[in-house]
Image (cartoon, rainbow, N blue to C red):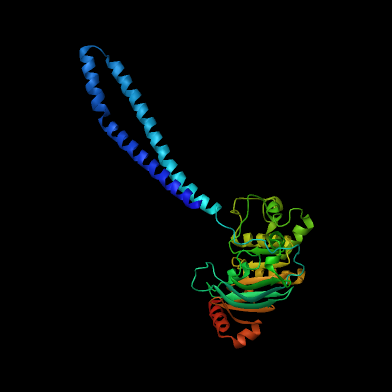
Amino acid sequence: MHLEAEVYGLVLGGFVIVVVCTLLVLIYLFWRSRNQAILWFGGSSIRTGTMQVGELTGFLSYVLQILNSLMMLSNVFMMLTRSMASGTRILEVLNEKVEITEEKARPVSVKKGAIRFDHVFFQYSKNAEEYVLSDICLNLEAGQTIGIIGQTGAAKSTLVQLIPRLYEATKGCVYVDDVPVQEYPLEHLRDAIAMVLQKNTLFSGTVRDNLRWGKEDATQEEIDEACRIACVDEFIDRLDNGYDTELGQGGVNVSGGQKQRLCIARAILKQPKVLILDDSTSAVDTATEVKIREGLKAKLPEMTKIIIAQRISSVRSADQIVILDDGKINAVGTHEQLLAENRIYQEIYHSQQEGGAL
């Protein structure tokens, strides 16, 4: 069926291109010779007295209008060929087979937020020669704060995206509360997990409207509490209308750090069982980042918190720190243990210490 549609599309596209090219050639030839031909025939008619000069001028005007219409028609054909190409690409997306299904789902929901990776392997394509993640074995207890650190390209973000099934593990299994993630309905699983990325999205509307994307029926007290934890309360009063301040599309009228704090508050307002912060405090100063971590630990002790960061200062107080190196777990431990025993952690620590990042 797909092959027939592709062949039909190619034949129709080729026919349209031939018609357009022919039409353009004819218009070009007629355009180049129109004045000479009209003036020659018109001059002959004026000499014989069968046409007046005004009639010839009017005729030239009408011919020009017709040619302009033909040029517009040729442009329509050109747009048609482009539209057909775009339509083909759209159909390819619509016909793409969905790989993440709910065939094994059963009526269960996340209760605590404990996470376990059991010999997990992952590759983006089945034809890929190497795995992006290899033999990941990791236990994250409910309520813990887990830091994940590693060089750029170590697959830190890919690892956490396996939890809400944004990607499917190629081998092995990811468990949430000792239940394979494939057995959760996708809606329930993703409702229990909140993820804040480095590049955050804010929408047109007020600050309050943006926060309520986390919880539509949130009370003002809940909004205030989430904003205190995310340190939004430090700048909300400085905005023109507080929570009723209008934000431009993408939050263009707030700074990068303020945008990140608003997105963290929105995620907290959702009250998830698992909160994933993927380098989401990169634009926040160190003192504010410490306040956010302390607020999460004190106010949300039962929530599992996963922090992906480039700076050791962002994860040093975590219950466990996971070091990823080229898609593999290099070491797991506390800040003190890794600083004493792990070479990669030591190198990152000393380089950031010299650069003033600690």
| Residue 335 or residue 144, whichever sits in front | 144
- Farthest-out residue, bottom: 341
**Which image quadrant for residue 232?**
bottom right
Q: Residue 194 vs residue 62: left or right?
A: right
Image position, residue 195 (x, y; %)? 65, 64
Image-quadrant location for residue 292: bottom right
In this view, 284 is above or below 240? below
Front residue of this view, candidates 353 and 19: 19
Left or right, 313 with reference to 179: left
Residue 33 rendering spot, x and y as whole percentages: 25, 30
Q: From this viewpoint, is residue 354 visible?
A: yes
> Which quarter of the figure has residue 133?
bottom right
In depth, the one of 345 and 101 nearer the eye is 101
Counting from the top left corner in percent of width and height, residue 328 is at 57, 78
Q: Is residue 231 visible?
A: no
* Numbered circles on residues, count: 0
Report the residue at 74% width, 53% height from top. Answer: 216
Above-or-below relation of 341 to 141: below
In percent of width and height, residue 127 lies at 50, 68
- Quadrant for the C terminus in the image: bottom right
Q: Is residue 130 above or below residue 263?
A: below
